[in-house]
């Protein structure tokens, strides 16, 4: 595993590990003494990430008015599993009797692959790739979501999940 290789190669005096809900903390805790390990937990700014009314202007800009909106906010890298969000949306949209849209907020090297996957799913027009946004805009985007999808294949309670919950959005 990479954790063992890192500690053998670099022999750190101290390790700082982000607790994102993944198994990383436990793995690193087995490799170094507690005195050489500091665990940092996510902290969400509740003054920024809080329940707010839907931003109707953003709904218009995204073309998602009057739709049930599923949203995915994450970097578009394979580890985040955004393909699974598209697959889940396709299943949902096929069973839902109303209008549904998936909004993917983020940028990354997988974007082209994900756009092609959405097109080939038969629901391409119902999937909006909003691109990367500033952190200060995340809560505004979350305001228009009915449900937030978190599909990381590595971290089970990542920062974006915590931000969505802080905004009162179901995951």
Image (cartoon, helix red, strand yellow):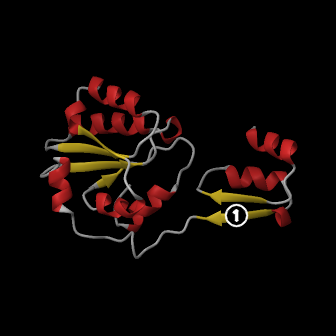
Q: Residue at x 20, y 44 (%)?
A: 100
Residue count near mark 1 (Cα–Cα under 10 Å), binned few <14, some 14–19, many ≥20: few
Q: Residue furthest bottom?
A: 47
Residue 135 is left or right of residue 21, and the answer is left
Residue 43 is left or right of residue 14, and the answer is left
Tally the marks: 1
Q: Vertical placement of 86 versus 23: above or below?
A: above
Q: Vertical placement of 38 versus 110: above or below?
A: below
Query: How far from the left and from the top, in percent, is residue 61?
Result: 18, 51
Q: Secondary structure at mark 1?
A: strand
Q: Residue furthest top?
A: 120
Q: Residue at x 27, y 43 (%)?
A: 102
Residue 34 is left or right of residue 108, and the answer is right
Q: Quadrant of residue 76?
A: top left
Quadrant for the C terminus, please.
bottom left
Query: How far from the left and from the top, in percent, is residue 27?
Result: 74, 49
Give the residue at mark 1.
Answer: 39
Q: Residue at x 24, y 58 (%)?
A: 144
Q: Vertical placement of 41 versus 130: above or below?
A: below
Q: Vertical placement of 100 versus 145: above or below?
A: above
Q: Residue at x 81, y 52 (%)?
A: 30
Query: How far from the left and from the top, in percent, is residue 163?
Result: 43, 62
Quadrant for the N terminus, please.
top right
Query: How far from the left and from the top, in percent, is residue 77?
Result: 49, 38
């Amino acid at each position: 595993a990479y954790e063992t290789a890192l500690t053998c190669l670099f022999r750190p005096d101290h390790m700082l590990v982000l607790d994102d809900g993944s198994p990383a903390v436990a793995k690193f805790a087995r490799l170094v003494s507690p005195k050489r390990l500091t665990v940092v937990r996510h902290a969400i700014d509740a003054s920024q990430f809080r329940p707010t009314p839907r931003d109707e202007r953003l709904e218009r800009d995204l073309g998602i008015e009057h739709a049930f909106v599923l949203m995915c906010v994450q970097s578009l890298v394979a580890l985040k599993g955004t393909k699974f969000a598209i697959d889940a949306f396709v299943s949902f949209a096929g069973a839902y009797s109303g209008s549904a849209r998936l909004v993917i907020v983020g940028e990354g090297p997988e974007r082209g692959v994900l756009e092609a996957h959405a097109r080939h799913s038969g629901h391409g027009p119902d999937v909006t790739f909003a691109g990367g946004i500033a952190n200060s805009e995340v809560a505004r985007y979350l305001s228009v979501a009915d449900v937030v999808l978190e599909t990381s294949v590595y971290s089970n309670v990542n920062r974006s999940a915590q931000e969505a919950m802080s905004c009162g959005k179901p995951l």
